[in-house]
Image (tube, grey):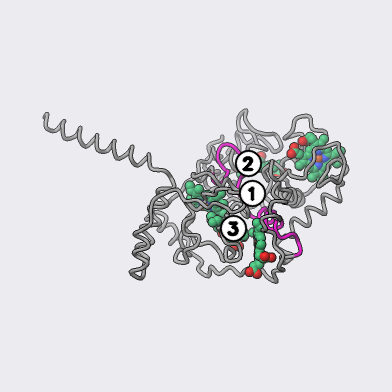
């Protein structure tokens, strides 16, 4: 009997030690372990194998020349420059060919994607944790950073079309009657010359939709704007970044005219089933917490659940009584389909994010 107790005690201790060890491993360590293992498996030549064996588990960072900013996105996005990883799941997927004209040592990742360069967890790096810091730009919002360096002259028109339309709308609605941008305009509202560095794109959308829903007692008028118009104004406002002068000095502003967009050389379109298998086998499965994402993706700016949250959109406390999971999923994927003519923004959420939000909202009944 005693012997058995001793043995099971030992097993218990071992299990405990293993659990603690496993939990103490940082999230990024899992991605690095998976990458090194896969790189070794895929190595074709002795030189490749040697390279893969020499890889070290460590926080990796890019130190940008000029202003010394540090970015750690590559701690997890390790395969960005490795062509063997075209059909692997994120964060271990080869980047598209656009990095050939924007070498990472000079441009980093944040200049195009936004996000928090110093962080080493997914939620913090993407700025989508509990506190809305500097969230990744998604979908059309990335046009803001392209425009930041390229203006309209050096890219094909479709690459900055939303920015151009946003700027036209800002003129049409006489925003400069009350606001200054680059020294021009009125004084009734705050200067907007660097608003893109101080506000997230979700905040700008919410504020343009209903200023009083975001800033209590705001005297800014509500404009009768469509969903796509509010979006384009927000994209234009996101081009008003603090770093405009610094880029000229670095020099990172584009001068050459690009005749066309760099063709996406990622010919491999990964099979979704294959991706799932790879995720499971490599242990890089990532899951969002729907409640945290409700804050991080900006929903909470506009919607209340219980007593916390904004009042730009309807409260979602009992939303599951009204909408089933399938309807919620379609709504989050494409608000225009389920709420035609409405104001709920297109947030360009990906499948994992939508699944997590639907799981969370489905409990609200
Ligand atoms: C010059 C701008 C630019 C830079 C710099 C840049 N990216 Fe991208 N990235 C893009 C664009 C544009 C896309 C969308 C795919 C495409 O059309 O190339 C993209 C796609 C991605 C994706 C896949 C998501 C998708 O929509 O397919 C990931 C992940 C990513 N980038 C991460 C990074 C990381 C990490 C870095 C830094 C090592 C980085 N990017 C640097 C422009 C950039
Ligand atoms: C701790 C690891 C980690 C760090 C640090 C990190 N990422 Fe990611 N990234 C991930 C994971 C995991 C995914 C896949 C999650 C998903 O599919 O939503 C991802 C996905 C992405 C995507 C694709 C998003 C989409 O919707 O498809 C982009 C773009 C991206 N990351 C950019 C960045 C940038 C820019 C930084 C630095 C500011 C960064 N990441 C830092 C782990 C990380
Ligand atoms: C930090 C500044 C910066 C950002 C942000 C940026 N670019 Fe560029 N881009 C450049 C510079 C510099 C060049 C090189 C051309 C030159 O020197 O005039 C360039 C070149 C290009 C080219 C021409 C490539 C070639 O080889 O002909 C394309 C296309 C392009 N960029 C698209 C984009 C897109 C799309 C985005 C947004 C996702 C973007 N860029 C974001 C600075 C930037
Ligand atoms: C009648 C004057 C008036 C007009 C016209 C006006 N605004 Fe405002 N705006 C204000 C006032 C006052 C505030 C400060 C209160 C607030 O933040 O809502 C403000 C705040 C803002 C802010 C928040 C700035 C920050 O960082 O706190 C943004 C962004 C903004 N306005 C954008 C716009 C846009 C875009 C338009 C045109 C579609 C516009 N405004 C038209 C008066 C105006
Ligand atoms: C900028 C404000 C804003 C943001 C951010 C926002 N929404 Fe909405 N949402 C609205 C508005 C306004 C409506 C009302 C319908 C319409 O006008 O399209 C709405 C409608 C909805 C509805 C349907 C409500 C009902 O009573 O039928 C759901 C569900 C929803 N939003 C979920 C979300 C989720 C989840 C997020 C975050 C991923 C989010 N929303 C982010 C403004 C917003």
Separation of marks 1 and 3 at Cα, in angstroms: 29 Å
Asked if the residue at label 1 sits under 8 Å from ligand 5, the reply is yes
Give the class, few, some or many, for how many residues have Cα within 10 Å of label 3's Cα (few <14, many ≥20).
Answer: some
Q: Tag 3 or tag 1, which sits nearer the N-term?
A: 3
Q: Tag 1 or tag 2, which sits nearer the N-term?
A: 2
Q: Of helix, strand and loop, which one carries label 2?
A: loop
The residue pinned by badge 1 equals 347
Q: Which mark is residue 298?
A: 2
Give the magenta range.
125-153
Residue drawn at (60%, 62%), measured in percent from left and top? 102
Q: Of helix, strand and loop, which one carries label 3?
A: helix
Separation of marks 2 and 1 at Cα, in angstroms: 9 Å
Residue 136, position as x, y percentages in the image: 60, 49
Residue 167, position as x, y percentages in the image: 80, 53
Quadrant containing ligand 1:
bottom right
Asked if the residue at label 2 sits under 8 Å from ligand 5, the reply is yes
Q: Of helix, strand and loop, which one carries label 1?
A: loop
Q: Which mark is residue 106?
A: 3
Q: Find residue 282 and report its image quarter.
A: bottom left
Q: Tag 2 or tag 3, which sits nearer the N-term?
A: 3
Residue drawn at (40%, 49%), measured in percent from left and top? 30
| Residue 23 on the magenta segment | no
- From the viewer's perspective, tell me whether residue 11 is left or right of residue 316: left
Q: Nearer the viewer, residue 252 or 263?
A: 252
Q: Find residue 293 and report its image quarter.
A: top right
Residue 220 visible = no
Residue drawn at (83%, 42%), measured in percent from left and top? 179
Q: Which mark is residue 64?
A: none
Q: Nearer the viewer, residue 112 or 170?
A: 112
Give the class, few, some or many, for how many residues have Cα within 10 Å of label 1's Cα (few <14, many ≥20).
Answer: many
């Amino acid at each position: 009997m005693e012997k058995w107790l001793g043995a099971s005690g030992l097993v218990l201790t071992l299990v405990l030690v293993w659990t603690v060890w496993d939990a103490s491993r940082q999230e990024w360590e899992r991605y690095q372990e998976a990458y090194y293992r896969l790189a070794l498996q895929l190595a074709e030549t002795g030189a490749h194998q040697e390279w893969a064996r020499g890889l070290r588990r460590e926080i990796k960072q890019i130190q940008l020349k000029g202003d010394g900013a540090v970015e750690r996105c590559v701690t997890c996005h390790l395969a960005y420059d490795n062509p063997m990883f075209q059909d692997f799941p994120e964060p271990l997927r080869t980047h598209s060919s656009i990095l050939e004209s924007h070498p990472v040592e000079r441009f980093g990742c944040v200049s195009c994607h936004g996000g928090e360069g110093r962080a080493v967890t997914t939620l913090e790096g993407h700025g989508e944790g509990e506190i809305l810091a500097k969230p990744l730009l998604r979908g059309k919002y990335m046009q803001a950073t392209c425009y930041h360096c390229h203006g309209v002259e050096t890219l094909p028109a479709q690459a900055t079309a939303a920015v151009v339309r946003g700027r036209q709308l800002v003129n049409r609605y006489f925003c400069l009657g009350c606001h200054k941008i680059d020294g021009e305009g009125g004084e009734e509202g705050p200067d907007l010359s660097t608003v893109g560095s101080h506000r997230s794109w979700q905040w700008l959308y919410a504020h343009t939709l209903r200023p009083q829903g975001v800033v209590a007692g705001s005297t800014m008028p509500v404009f009768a704007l469509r969903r796509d118009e509010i979006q384009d104004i927000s994209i234009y406002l996101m081009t008003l970044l603090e770093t405009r002068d610094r880029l000229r000095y670095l020099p990172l502003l584009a001068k050459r005219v690009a005749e066309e967009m760099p063709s996406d050389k990622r010919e491999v379109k990964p099979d979704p089933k294959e991706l799932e298998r790879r995720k499971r086998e490599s242990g890089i499965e990532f899951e969002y917490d729907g409640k945290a994402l409700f804050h991080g993706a900006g929903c909470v700016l506009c919607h209340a659940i219980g007593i916390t949250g904004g009042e730009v959109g309807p409260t979602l406390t009992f939303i599951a009584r009204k909408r089933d999971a399938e309807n919620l999923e379609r709504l989050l994927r494409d608000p225009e389909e389920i709420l035609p003519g409405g104001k709920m923004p297109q947030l360009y959420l990906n499948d994992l994010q939508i699944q997590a939000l639907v799981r969370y909202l489905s409990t609200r009944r």
